[in-house]
């Protein structure tokens, strides 16, 4: 839970602990901070109760059916559905429990700017609903580009956002991939796989951070951050290279820094593993 939290100060603390103790020590510090906040304790308890009810085939409260859940899929959600970027399993659970939901058909290989417009247009069409956005990874960055006080005032149907491991501030890995000579390999790999090179450029760390300079203070709009925070021995083979590159910068999941995946001033739920 990051209410009244100086993000810059926490970032500095995490880097200091990593360099002077260990990355696992910094990871434990962040997990402890998130878990021990009262608001986070409350929402985690509600989360566990709802999971228990679903598992036992008990009915959820009718208040959850008052909302329309708009899922924004992650990068390459059609090409690589095994990553879970298409929310197939989660959406089935919601449908089985009578909760209205939709997977927005964004361009799986589209740019952040392009997909942001698609999301905004769909939200505008749902002006008679109470909309809750659900994003993962890159789609979190797409939503982060337009969420601000002015937009929320003009879009009263938008009630909340569930941000799952969102690349809200990009990733130092994207910056690394676009730096010479690594950018030559990046361009070649993206070319042979028919991927849009603009996407990796948009996710550069310093570019994406600009969206959070003046963050919103809208009290009616709720955000829940869900992040996976792995320890050293929980990183998979696929995530190992990125994890090592980001090691000195603090807790990460092999793709981005954990602190950069949390929308400031909002509720957080941490899971001690590599993927949510």
Image (cartoon, helix red, strand yellow):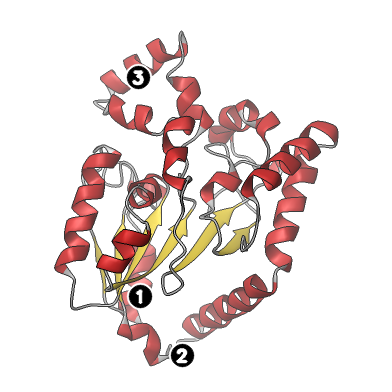
| Residue 98 visible, this orientation | no
Q: In this view, does 270 lie to the left or right of 134?
A: right
Give the vertical position of 229 relative to 237 (above or below): below
151 or 58, which is in the foreground? Answer: 151
Seen in the picture, residue 182 relative to 267 is either above or below; the reply is above
Work out whether residue 203 or residue 28 is closer to the camera in this orientation and state it.
203
Q: Where is residue 256 in the image (x, y as percent from the top left)?
A: 54, 38
Q: Is residue 151 left or right of residue 136?
A: left
| Residue under the image location 23 percent in, 77 percent down | 129
Secondary structure category for the residue under label 2? loop
Relative image position of residue 58 (x, y in whole percent): 46, 90
Quick check: 152 left or right of 262? Answer: left
Q: How crowded is mark 1: few (under 14 residues within 10 Å), some or many (20 or more)?
A: some
- Could you tell me if the residues under marks 2 and 1 are in contact, i.e. CB atoms within 8 Å? no
Q: Are marks 3 and 1 in contact (CB under 8 Å)?
A: no
The residue tagged 1 is 94
The quarter of the rendered structure image containing the N terminus is bottom right
Which residue is under mark 3?
189
- Write the residue at 37% across / 51% down: 85
């Amino acid at each position: 839970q990051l209410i009244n939290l100086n993000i810059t100060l926490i970032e500095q603390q995490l880097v200091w602990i990593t360099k002077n103790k260990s990355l696992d020590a910094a990871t434990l510090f962040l997990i402890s901070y998130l878990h021990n906040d009262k608001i986070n304790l409350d929402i985690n308890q509600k989360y566990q109760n709802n999971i228990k009810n679903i598992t036992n085939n008990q009915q959820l409260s009718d208040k959850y059916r008052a909302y329309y859940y708009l899922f924004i899929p992650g990068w390459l959600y059609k090409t690589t559905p095994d990553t879970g970027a298409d929310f197939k399993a989660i959406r089935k659970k919601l449908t089985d429990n009578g909760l209205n939901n939709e997977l927005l058909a964004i361009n799986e290989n589209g740019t952040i700017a392009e997909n942001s417009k698609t999301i905004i247009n769909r939200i505008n069409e749902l002006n008679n609903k109470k909309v809750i956005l659900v994003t993962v990874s890159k789609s979190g960055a797409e939503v982060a580009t337009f969420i601000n006080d002015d937009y929320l005032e003009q879009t009263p149907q938008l009630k909340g956002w569930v941000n799952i491991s969102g690349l809200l501030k990009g990733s130092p890995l994207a910056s690394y991939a676009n730096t010479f000579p690594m950018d030559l390999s990046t361009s070649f790999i993206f070319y042979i796989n028919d991927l849009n090179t603009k996407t990796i450029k948009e996710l550069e760390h310093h570019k994406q951070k600009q969206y959070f300079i003046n963050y919103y203070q809208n009290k009616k709009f709720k955000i829940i951050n869900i992040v996976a925070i792995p320890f050293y021995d929980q990183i998979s083979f696929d995530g190992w290279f990125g994890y090592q590159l980001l090691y000195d910068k603090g807790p990460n999941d092999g793709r981005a820094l954990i602190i950069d995946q949390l929308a400031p001033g909002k509720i957080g739920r941490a899971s001690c593993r590599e993927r949510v």
